[in-house]
Amino acid sequence: MQYQAAIGFSHVITVKYGLKVGRALQGECMTTFHDVPADLLIADLAQRLVDNDSINAPEWADFVKTGTHREKPPEQSDWWYVRCAAVLRKVAMKGPIGTNHMSQQFGGPKNRGVKPNRAVSGSRKVARTALQQLAAAGFITDSFNTAGTVTLGKIISPTGQSLLDESAHSVRPLAEERHPELARY
């Protein structure tokens, strides 16, 4: 059983057996950051952020810990760009989000010796500086209440959304190769 319904002027959705068959059959859909695994997306985003002039590792990034739950600083040389890429993805997923909530996202269990572990936040300085650099690059913006008087947090800007989607589209073949079940979507 097949039905066709015209929506607008140029969109036709065909319904077969209760299932929608729309844009996916007409051509290739744009991949969003929700469609690919986070590790592939963040690695590709970090490479794209290295080329951006607004995002640079601070001078203290070589010897700072990323939270009180860590014993040593990160060993990767490009950890700042990886963190900024992860922060950009988190802002897109959870925004509006502020510095405190962002530092909680990158926290972990603190080893307190013989006492039980407790959850602690990550470094607020790292989260704040990453958010400031992403805002300076134009990838995120402030979100205000309806009166415009209170800042609700950071949200993704159209430039940041397009960067995320382009990166997701470029890693899509690798994601499908690694996870064949993604080819259905």
Image (tube, rainbow, N blue to C red):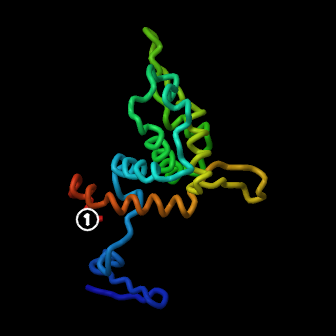
Residue 76 at x, y percent in the picture? 39, 34
Q: Nearer the viewer, residue 93 or 43?
A: 43
User: Is the residue marked by circle 1 packed among few (<14), some (14-19), or many (20+) residues within 10 Å?
Assistant: few
Instruction: Please give the residue where the numbered disc 1 appears in the rendered image.
Output: 184
Number of numbered discs: 1
Q: Is residue 183 above or below residue 21?
A: above
Residue 23 at x, y percent in the picture? 36, 77
Quadrant (top left, top right, bottom left, bottom right) of the C terminus: bottom left
Q: Nearer the viewer, residue 22 or 85?
A: 85
Q: What residue do we see at 44% from left, 19% from top?
A: 71
Judging from the image, what secondary structure is the residue with disc 1 in? Answer: helix
Q: Nearer the viewer, residue 58 or 151?
A: 58
Residue 145 at x, y percent in the picture? 72, 55
Residue 110 at x, y percent in the picture? 47, 21
Quadrant (top left, top right, bottom left, bottom right) of the N terminus: bottom left
Q: What residue do we see at 44% from left, 17% from top?
A: 111
Q: Amino acid at mark 1?
A: Arg
Q: Nearer the viewer, residue 93 or 12?
A: 93
Q: What residue do we see at 26% from left, 56% from top?
A: 174
Q: Is residue 20 above or below residue 89?
A: below
Residue closest to the far top: 114
- Tell me: 30 left or right of 155: left
